[in-house]
Amino acid sequence: MENEAKENTRNIGKIAVITLAVYAGIRWLVPLFLPFLTAFLLAKLINPMVEKMEQKFRLKRTFWSSLLVSILMASLVLVTIFFLKTLVDQIGNVAENLDLYRQQAEKLWQDCCCQVETFAGIAPGTIQDSLEKQLPKIIDHLHSNFFPAMMNETISYAKSMFILIGICFIVVISTVLILKDYKKIRSGLEKNPIGKAALQVCRRTYAAGGAYLKSQLIILVIITIICVAGLYLSGNKYALLTGCGIGICDAMPFLGTGTVFVPWALFEVIQGKYMLASIYAAIYTICTLIREILEPKLLGNKLGMPPLTVIISMYVGLKIYGLWGFVLGPLSYILIKEIYLTT
């Protein structure tokens, strides 16, 4: 009994040490080495194709590495440019029609106030007059706080874009260099005891974490396509912009497509636009069914985590790491588990 208690205490201490090490690694080390980790993952994915091309055409490995990485990066750049151009066009369209949307919003606001006043038995114009008295204060607050903050954020985002371009350049160069000496790097790690253990943990983590990320990415893309297509067919001018935003909401564990489509459908019902409300309800239903069907099939038993554990790890991850916690939380759990089993 005493030996069992000591063993349990030792295991708890071991888990605590591993947890702290994983947290410190993800919090401080991963951001420093992220470009090179990304490059290594890309090299791992591209390496089988490089080896086939090298054997088939008898050209140097460096040539095929550079060519395939360049094709991949060029494809990503073209897709990104097309995507951003469409988004910018739609945002520009919103800006051009801002006065029209303001008039529509004012009319809708007046209708809502009238309906509330009629329902509550309040004298007509009471709600609108009281709120209009507060409007100058709200506008002053926006001018003094919101707009300056928005300008500062815009400058910050511009700086971040330049940094991101530099990081992408480092990733591309690193991927080519890793592919060039991929076999030597792999062999060197496998000969070293620490490197061998690290590779074993990485393989298991990559298998489980990769399955999770891959499944979430596939579901995100499919649901985004459904949202964009549904909104486009409904006549929405900003189908791509809105659909992408809703797709990202669906990827968040505590949001989902219902966060947007349910109130949106109710809003259209209030306006008497029952067809639009039916379309939004149908899109929401289809997206929910798609996630419920695809998630078990794509993941299966590859993740090795019960659904409750996934939700708990996501929640803890969001609390510890912030927005990226919904990915880093499950990844941390998988790392802790694999390191514990290996050591």
Image (cartoon, rainbow, N blue to C red):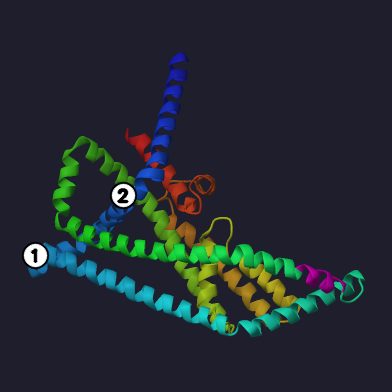
**Which residue is label 1 attached to?**
60
Q: Identify the element where label 1 is drawn.
A: loop
Q: Is residue 54 left or right of residue 332?
A: left
> Foreground: 292 or 280?
280
- What residue lies at 54% left-to-right and 63% top-to-bottom? 250
- What residue lies at 27% left-to-right and 69% top-to-bottom? 72
Picture coordinates of residue 30, whole percent (x, y)? 35, 47
Q: Is residue 183 left or right of residue 300?
A: left
10 Å crowding of disc 1: few (<14), some (14-19), many (20+) = few
Q: Amino acid at mark 2?
A: Phe
Which comes before the other along the chain, label 2 or label 1? 2
Look at the numbered discs 2 and 1 and tell me whether their residues touch, using CB distance below 8 Å. Answer: no
**Which residue is label 2 attached to?**
33
Picture coordinates of residue 129, whole percent (x, y)? 84, 73
Whether 127 is among the magenta residues is yes
> Foreground: 311 or 92?
92
Q: For residue 258, say whether it is visible.
A: no
Dividing the picture into quarters, in which one does residue 188 lie? Answer: top left
> Foreground: 334 or 260?
260
* Segment colored magenta: 126-134
Dividing the picture into quarters, in which one does residue 264 lie? Answer: bottom right
Q: For residue 138, say whether it is visible.
A: yes
Residue placed farthest to the left in the image?
58
Picture coordinates of residue 274, whole percent (x, y)? 71, 80
Q: Which dot marks residue 97? A: none
- Judge depth for marks 2 and 1 and give the one in front: 2
Q: Amino acid at mark 1?
A: Lys
Is the residue 12 above or below the residue 266 in the image? above
Pick the quarter of the image with the C terminus.
top left
What main secondary structure does the magenta stretch of the protein show?
Answer: helix
Disc 2 and disc 1: Cα gap in Å?
Answer: 28 Å
10 Å crowding of disc 2: few (<14), some (14-19), many (20+) = few
